[in-house]
Amino acid sequence: MTAPVLTAPAPASLRFHPLRDSATMLRRNLKRMLRYPSMTVMLVGMPVVFLLLFVYVLGGTLGAGLGASVPGAAGGGRAAYANYVAPAIILMTVAATVQGTAISIAMDMTEGIITRFRTMHIARVSVLTGHVLGSMIQAMISLAVVIGVALLVGFRPTAGLGGWLATAGFLVAVSFALVWLAVALGQVSKSVETASNLPMPLILLPFLGSGFVPTDSMPAGLRWFAEYQPFTPIIETLRGLLMDEPLGNNAWIALAWCAVIALGGYLWSKRLFNRES
Amino acid sequence: MTSTHSRPAIAVTGLRKSFGDHVVLDGLDLHVPQGTVFSLLGANGAGKTTTVRILSTLLGADGGDVTVAGHDLAREPDAVRAAIGVTGQFSAVDKLLTGEENLRLMADLHHLGRGEGRRRVARLLDQFDLTRAAGKPASTYSGGMLRRLDLAMTLVGSPQVIFLDEPTTGLDPRSRRDMWQIVRDLVAAGVTIFLTTQYLEEADELADRIGVLDHGRLVAEGTAEELKRRIPGGHVRLRFADHHGLDAALRILGQASPDTDALALRVPSDGSLRSLKTLIGQLDDRAIEVDELSVHTPDLDDVFLALTGDSRNEKVTAP
């Protein structure tokens, strides 16, 4: 005779369905993106404007100054600079997308529907994973658009199929990390305005790294920061993958940063979501 | 139905909650039988919304025992969530989605099958008079439509217990009456309703039992009739053309309380024809001109003001 079971399995109606609920929440977020297209346009537009600005307005002069330290920029000029700046613009695209994530999370939090979700018997995490998956899809679409424009204005990557696949995989990892961070930033914001400002540093960080000019042209203190901040190895990895150059340690450092940011963002988000409001 | 009345849908004993030094709920006891409407009355800040937030698992309590739909709130919050529906003071709808999409979202989250979800959504749209607006984004809805959609979304999961936190605040009279009818229909179907409101009329119309919340405690509980009987608030209100008439009437009607600004006098009365005759006779004898006379039986306003010690507007006069 077996001992009586103290914890009976939950009845079918009380079981959680995180995957199904996440898919439902993803559908909701995709519909919201379609209903509010101006935000998507704005989020894609920003990196495109920066790209055009840096290639056509600043590219001639900046390209001439790249110097011999940058491999592949020997010719100098606008064409060389287009190749140099494209990875930074690509990363900026991800940063702009997650700004949208923070805004839509904050919109949700102010609207009361999240309170309804909290009183329902659903897999709670699906509220957040729905946003994460939606933002990932949005990021991939934005990246395709921005890379397309970059190719049109003179970006000439030398990567083969393998390099492109590795780039795509790497961008998924970077987007995943930054999206989870943005989910936390969106929840920590008390208003939609704050939510749109909080991720601003993510858009500025490529400037304070190797995104737009080589770090060895910077003054000592800034240079130190630029070399150790997470966006520099991410940009260098993108550059290496797309221009078919050796990656060195950058790829591992970048992936480690992504893992840390993703995990930190996830744990922070979860804690914020489960706090009592 | 009578047999199920014995099992409580909501049972609360000694519920306490403070925010810092501020005590919001100070030992609240509630007992709501299944299939009835319980209305929690209270001024702003009395603790109504905090009570709803705790009972609907949004907020943890500092102390006390709560069961909702037979499940312990602290130990089985998931089972409680599966049994309840909440419609708050502020609409919990997705304004970028259409009415139908909002309802479909609820159907999907309740894991209703495709066909069953579709049928239930169509039925609720029809029942809540939203079929014509079903394809429009909720951002274009009027206040009354939003409130109806909000409640319809709550009903997709067929909850046994529904919390309505000030469901008609800010609604026009017509939408309010529509909402009342919906609540009556729900109760007829066996659902238990926990309603908070600042409108005494609403509690009077809908509630089987009413609890008056003041400073985190129930100061009275009973049916509307029982509560009205507790305080003697029947009176006749006389309005005069000028101060002269008011003063003259005040001299002969000792027990009356004057409202000088409105040139009115409140005279305690049981409202019977005989007492009215006497009153009119007294006024006639001294030829005092009365502009207007109205008879008031005690209403929940009187009860509420007497119980919560709020004597800003009216003074409760002993007979």
Image (spheres, coloured by chain):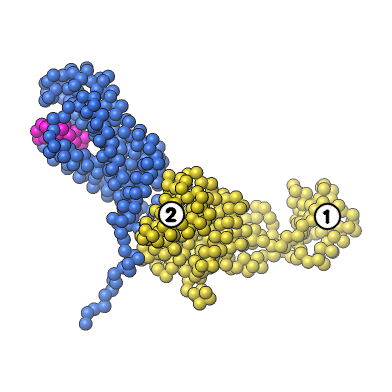
Q: Secondary structure at mark 1?
A: helix
Residues tagged by mark 2 and mark 1 found on one chain of the structure: yes
**Residue B1 shows in the view:** yes
Q: Secondary structure at mark 2?
A: helix
Q: Work out which quarter of the rendered image holds the C terminus of chain B and state it.
A: bottom right
Answer with left or right where residue A21 lies relative to residue B202. Answer: left
Q: Residue at x 52, y 58 (%)?
A: B127
User: Amino acid type of disc 1?
Assistant: Ala
Quadrant position of residue B55 = bottom left
Q: Colour of chain B?
A: yellow
- Predominant secondary structure in magenta? helix
Q: Residues within 10 Å of mark 1 (few under 14, many from 20)?
A: many
Q: Which chain is blue?
A: A
Name the subunit of mark 1: B
Instruction: Check disc 1 and report the residue beneath it.
Output: B249
Magenta segment boundaries in residue numbering: A228-248
What x and y, as percent, mark residue A173? 21, 42
What x and y, as percent, mark residue A52? 28, 24
Quadrant position of residue B158 = bottom left
**In-front residue for pair A92/B316:** A92
**Residue A215 shows in the view:** no
* Residue B45 belongs to the span the image colors magenta: no
Instruction: Check disc 2 and report the residue beneath it.
Output: B103
